[in-house]
Image (spheres, grey):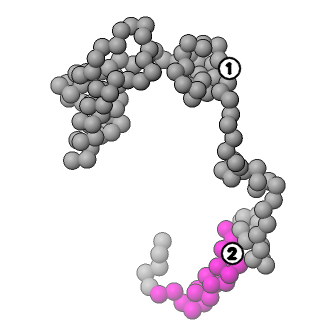
Amino acid sequence: MPPKGKLTDRQIEILERWVRLGAPWPGAKASPTPPDGSFTITEQHRQFWAIRPVEAVPPPRVHDAAWPRSPIDRFILAGLEAKGIAPAAEAGKRTLIRRATFDLIGLPPTPRKSTPSWPTIHPGVRPRRRPPACLASVRRALGTALA
């Protein structure tokens, strides 16, 4: 907790010395900054995922080639298949509206607002994208969230 009053000169001196040392964490194995102030990037640093160059990775092969709609879906399905899990059935319109409303405002939609207002998709037809009319439900929920 912060002190109630001003630090003593001795306490300030201790803090200044700690900062000059590179502010090492008590019990840490190594200092965050070398004593001479230099910094060296090692091969281990270069292998860290966040600083490696972006590489194109081909999507993995999957057993159910009919399920993925995009290359990203193939990565998801490969992970599910590796764990022996089948993907869930496609959600209906009402479920999608309910999920979006919960995500956007944290509450369920009212019965009137949970009525789908976009065109029917025929069974067995898997469109590449949802029809734009479904965005009205999301916009309505966003409007509520922003109000």
Residue 61: which disc? 1
Give the residue furthest to the bottom.
9
How many C-alpha atoms fall within 10 Å of the one at disc 1: few (<14), some, or many (≥20)? Answer: few
Query: Between 57 and 79, which is closer to the camera in this rendering?
Result: 57
Q: Tag 1's secondary structure?
A: loop
Can residue 27 be seen in the rendering of this structure? Answer: yes
**Residue at horizontal 58%, vertical 86%?**
11
- Picture quadrant of residue 138: top left
**Residue at horizontal 32%, vertical 27%?**
132
Residue 14: say if magenta.
Answer: yes
Left or right for 40, reference 77: right
> Residue 36: x, y in percent?
79, 78
Q: Which numbered disc, 2 or 1, marks the residue that appears first in the sequence?
A: 2
* Residue depth check, mark 2 versus mark 1: number of the one nearer the observer: 1
- Separation of marks 2 and 1 at Cα, in angstroms: 49 Å
For the magenta stretch, what is the residue range? 6-25
Q: Is residue 34 above or below residue 78?
A: below
Residue 22: which disc? 2
